[in-house]
Image: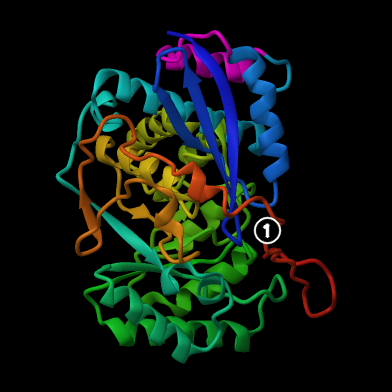
Amino acid sequence: MKITKISTLVVNARMRNWIFVKVETDQPGLYGWGEATLEWKTKGVVGAVEDLSVLLIGQDPRRIEHIWQIMHRQYFWRGGITNYSAMSGIDQALWDIKGKALGEPVCNLLGGPVRDTLRFYDHLGGGLLENMYKTIDPSEFAERIQISVEKGFTAVKAMPIPVSEYIESASTLKRAAKCVEAMRNAVGDDFDIMLDLHARCTPAAAIQFGRMLVDYNLYWYEEPCWPEHIDGLVEVARHLPMPIATGERLVGRWEFRELFEKRGCSIVQPDVSHCGGISEARRIAAMAEAYQISVACHNPQGPVSTASSTHVGFATPNYLIQEMVRADVPWRNDIVTEFIPLEAGQCTAPTKPGLGIDINEKEAAKYPFQPEVTMAYNHRDGSVADW
């Protein structure tokens, strides 16, 4: 069996351009899908997939680890979010091919399910741009978290920290704390709430804010400060009782090593569309297990990324919960021939061969590339802010 073609299909989903990677073989009808979505870097990733394809045409797609090593090591320049995202999409597609060729779901090829069900968490308001990233009033937080409850979810992630100064004022932090209070009061204690700070805070501000939230029993406290600053994450983790989650912007197992060694988090969030694919996500998860760190793959992307993450989740002992977006665009499920059925915010193990989904290319073609909605913010003084 040989790889005959590697191509990309870009689908504009408003805030993101989904980058689907299709790997075709010389076996009639046998191909695989992966996802390499990287918002605001779409053309760079598409180009990186083309660059890697030069090395892979003619290779046996079943030699997944060998191909991973080719993609990582064969060119002189390694690493970087763009290259790793391209590698991730191809890697997922290879697992899809191997599963289809063997008639087995990918999670079975990874050792088989280690759990009967996998829980998913919702984004505030289902992941619609305005609901997740532009909600600012406490009453809106309370109303929108109820939408997730009505859809059967038992956990939600929200973003209460506005784009402001590095060291937020007391009034800003208190207002953000009221948003968390409103959500907790709306859903009670039998519901899990995660907060994403998007690394907008300094370690000191993250600690100050976290202390205001102790009574609200957060499931986790995500990216409280820059992920490049491991010592800052360690500082926050040492001063707060809630679990720290991070890792979505790290790629390759080597970038996770220091985070684990210093215990800068309790929950690590590799992204199967960025970190190096299913293969690398599994290796990162195994490293995390040695440090008693849980895994919850980052996944605000499209349906192929969700499927890939789900297979990793079912086969990974230290997996905690799975992120998903469901309402970013109304036609989300129209472009896939199958999608993961959820009941009460969870699903059972996939049983269909490969990743278990296929892309309706004709439907996907209705939404060609457009520049993504930009999230360009400035501080009050006009300087550039982390969005």
Is 296 on the left or on the right of 387, as rendered?
left
Q: Is residue 237 visible?
A: yes
**Dot 1, how many residues are within 10 Å of its Cα: few (below 14), some (14-19), or many (20+)?**
some
162 vs 269: above or below: below
Q: Which residues are magenta?
A: 57-74
Asked if the stretch drawn in magenta spans residue 71, the answer is yes
Q: Quadrant of residue 114?
A: top left
Q: Quadrant of residue 220?
A: bottom left
Along the line of sight, which residue is nearer the eye, 180 or 264?
A: 180
Q: Quadrant of the N terminus?
A: top left
Is 316 on the left or on the right of 236, as rendered?
left
Q: Which residue is mark 1?
A: 372
Give the percent coordinates (x, y) of residue 368. 63, 51
Along the line of sight, which residue is nearer the eye, 152 or 336?
A: 336
Give me the residue at 24% from left, 70% from top: 152
Q: Amino acid at mark 1?
A: Glu
Q: Quadrant of the C terminus?
A: bottom right
Along the line of sight, which residue is nearer the eye, 263 or 335?
A: 335
Give me the residue at 70% from left, 15% from top: 75
Give me the residue at 54% from left, 15% from top: 4
Give the percent coordinates (x, y) of residue 352. 24, 35
Considering every residue shown, the one lying at the far left of the view is: 116
340 vs 57: above or below: below
Give the percent coordinates (x, y) of residue 201. 63, 67
Secondary structure, mark 1, is loop
Give me the residue at 41% from left, 81% from top: 144
Give the percent coordinates (x, y) of residue 276. 52, 31
Q: Is residue 280 visible?
A: no
Is 159 on the left or on the right of 268, as rendered?
right
Considering every residue shown, the one lying at the far right of the view is: 382
175 vs 108: above or below: below
Along the line of sight, which residue is nearer the eye, 15 or 30?
A: 30
